[in-house]
Image (cartoon, rainbow, N blue to C red):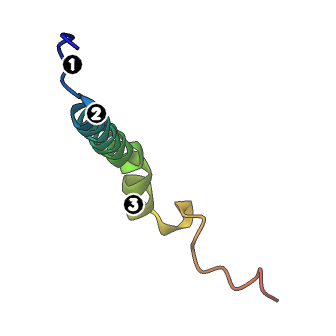
Amino acid sequence: MSEAQEKDNFWIIVAGVVLAVIVTVVLVKGSEHDKYESTAKAIAEDASNSAYRNNTAVGK
């Protein structure tokens, strides 16, 4: 039994995967923020640009 035991890298790999997932989520969330900026500006200029406007004719 003169074989040298290899260091177990399980927790290092798990930490790397968790870190990669966190970085991915942060990057995706950051890119989604700019996605709706032009829509928000258009709705601020004219509320009729919104699909969520108060339209009373639809319910009657």
The nearer-to-camera label among 3 and 2 is 2
Tell me the quarter of the picture where residue 31 sits. Answer: top left
User: Mark 2: which secondary structure?
Assistant: helix
Nearest to viewer (mark 1 / mark 3): 1
Query: Residue 42 location, x and y as percent?
Result: 43, 54
Q: Which quadrant would the C terminus be assigned to in this image?
A: bottom right
> Most extreme residue toward the bottom, as rendered?
60
Residue type (three-letter) at the residue carrying disc 1 = Glu
Q: Would you name the residue on which mark 1 appears?
A: 6
> Which residue is denoted by mark 2 in the rendering?
10
Compute the Cα span from label 1 to label 3.
64 Å
Q: Amino acid at mark 2?
A: Phe
The N terminus appears in which quarter of the rendering? top left
Q: Earlier in the sequence, mark 1 or mark 3?
A: 1
- Reading the image, the residue beneath label 3 is 45
Cα separation, mark 3 vs mark 2, equals: 54 Å
- Label 3: how many residues lie within 10 Å, few (<14), some (14-19) or many (20+)? few
| Above-or-below relation of 33 to 59 | above
Name the front one of labels 1 and 2.
Answer: 1
Kind of residue at badge 3: Glu
Residue 22 point in image, percent of width and height: 28, 43
Image point 17% across, 13% down: which residue? Answer: 4
- Does the residue at mark 1 contact the one at mark 3 (Cβ under 8 Å)? no
Q: Secondary structure at mark 3?
A: helix
* Viewer-closest of 44 and 36: 36
Residue 41: numbered disc: none
